[in-house]
Image (cartoon, rainbow, N blue to C red):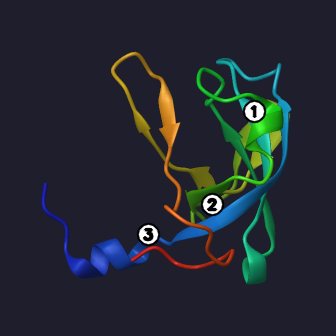
Amino acid sequence: MTISWADFEKVEMRVGTIVAAEPFPKARKPAYQLTIDFGPLGIRRSSAQITTLYEAEALVGRQVVAVVNFPPKQIATFMSECLVLGSVADNGTVTLLQPERPVENGLRIG
């Protein structure tokens, strides 16, 4: 399916820095609860199924790319406010997308 430039512009992808990462035992699949600083957009939380390649402690300070204009989604007892992006292998393993060098939190991906 082909999308238009206008369709692409509707997806607001931003860079943020993970400031906290905790195990999420109530999730159906292994996940972390992430707290992400998006600079001028503020702090948002996300549930991310990234436990295969990443330890919670090592995620703090890492920049990620996330979609920030989805509506909040209830996941078990947690409200996810953005969607952290990554490539997904056939076995479900997620590799995070991130800028290749540090950038200002909140910058838009375009």
Q: Is residue 100 left or right of residue 4?
A: right
Q: Quadrant of residue 92?
A: top left
Q: Nearer the viewer, residue 103 or 87?
A: 103
Specify the amino acid type for callout 2: Pro
Real-space Cα separation, disc 3 to disc 1, in angstroms: 24 Å
Residue 83: x and y, percent? Answer: 59, 51
Secondary structure of the residue carrying numbered label 1: strand
The residue at which mark 3 appears reads as 11
Quarter of the image with the C terminus in it: bottom left
Specify the amino acid type for callout 1: Tyr
Q: Residue at x 62, y 30 (%)?
A: 49
Depth check, mark 3 against mark 1: the one in front is 1
Q: Residue at x 83, y 35 (%)?
A: 57
Labelled disc at residue 104: none
The residue at which mark 2 appears reads as 71
Which badge, 3 or 1, comes first in the chain's sequence?
A: 3
Q: Is residue 30 above or below residue 110?
A: above
